Image (cartoon, rainbow, N blue to C red):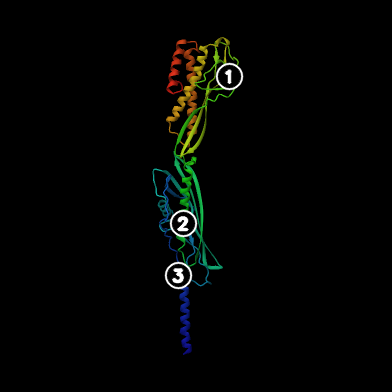
Amino acid sequence: MLLTFLRPAMSWVVAILSGVLLLAAQSVGPVPPIRLLAPTQTFAPQEFYVAQVIDERPDRRAVASLIPPATATTTAPAPKPQAVDLQGGGGSVIQKFIQQTLPANKQLRPITIRLRECKVTETSDPKAPSRVDGRITIKMAFDWQRDGQTIALTEYQGAARYGRPAGQLGVVEPTLRQALTEAMRYLHTWVKQNAPHNAKLATGVQVFFTDYTDNQEADTLFYDPKRPLDFADFKGTRQSGGNTAAVIFPNFAYQGATKVVGGKMQLHIAMKTFVVRSSSWVADHARTPYTLNHEQRHFDVVKLVVERFKQRIRQDTLSVDYYAGHLQYQYLLSYQEMNRMQEQYDGETGNGTNDAAQARWNERITKELQAFGVVQ
């Protein structure tokens, strides 16, 4: 009777042990995909919207490497990590999450998010098999298309850690959700703080012109309608013979400085219209009001060209990324215009010997200067 009893008892114990082993084996099955819930926190951008999310992760097969729950005894070997993706696919689910976190106003700057990394990695310590450590890493880059050019704005790298019991996976999804939320918080805050003054986020160019008239330099006379040429400005030595009575070499240049105010690139341009005194000369016999007027009109012609240059720039829509090249191009065109106009002026007035032509040019130049508000 005893042996008979023991045999069934032993068989029962073996059956129980086999059942435990079977349950342990079954517990280490495929881990289901992570169901990423909707964000619990959203932001309302006033400066941008997310136009697209580009998945640039090197490995897009799975977001996570998770250690599956196990119910085996503490002496059982730790199960190996399993590749687990988001339910619905990592890239598309993260894009939807981002769009929910940052509601879009398509009247604002269109920003592209480049997802460089989104990874959940778990490890276990053989000395503490009942615990699992997790690490989440998020890497993103942000840029936008402005005037057909990609502007790299900033990058984000974030990490989060968690610990969990070996038999529970519940902490994984909320930690991942919070890590993604923090990346969106960073973008929202960075743009909000930088939009008013960062050139990368400037949405247009505002041009402000000034005329440099500070005549403190000994050898340079800057154009000032209140301070016309006089013979004291002709300090050079006569360089040529013939019938030339006087020579000046008027010219113009510009200097620019920029700053971003209220999201706009403010371009402050100081125009310099000038003659160099040491390159200007007059023959002794030509020191007459007529000669001085003729040379002053050469100076006025350059001022007219400068005003036309300013007018064209004001009428243009300058690109934030190409305004410098555009200014230089317009400057070269104006420089050529100045040379043509000076040659035409001298040609028609006979270098100041044709009184009737000189009178016509005097009237023409004065009217144009008045139209630009240079003189009354």
Please provide percent x and percent y for residue 69: 47, 67
**Amino acid on which the number 3 mark rests in the picture:** Gln
Location of mark 2 (residue): 178
Looking at the rendering, which quadrant does residue 360 occupy?
Answer: top left
- Which secondary structure lies at badge 3? helix
Which residue appears at 57% of the width and 22% of the height? 220
- 173 shown above or below 140: below
**Does the image show residue 62?**
no
**Amino acid on which the number 1 mark rests in the picture:** Ser
- 164 shown above or below 307: below
Location of mark 1 (residue): 279
Looking at the rendering, which quadrant does residue 109 occupy?
Answer: top left
Location of mark 3 (residue): 26
- 65 shown above or below 17: above
**Residue that lies at the very extreme toward the bottom in this rendered image:** 1
Sort mark 1 into few (<14), some (14-19) or many (20+) by Cα contacts within 10 Å: some
Along the line of sight, the residue nearer the viewer: 79 or 347: 347
Please provide percent x and percent y for residue 153: 49, 44
Which callout, 3 or 1, points to the residue nearer the camera?
1
Please provide percent x and percent y for residue 229: 53, 18
Mark 3 to mark 1 CA distance (whole Å): 98 Å
Which residue appears at 44% of the width and 45% of the height? 111
Mark with earlier residue (1, 2):
2
Along the line of sight, the residue nearer the viewer: 44 or 150: 44
Mark with earlier residue (3, 1):
3
**Amino acid on which the number 2 mark rests in the picture:** Gln
Sort mark 2 into few (<14), some (14-19) or many (20+) by Cα contacts within 10 Å: some
**Does the image show residue 208?**
yes
- 141 shown above or below 223: below
Sort mark 3 into few (<14), some (14-19) or many (20+) by Cα contacts within 10 Å: few
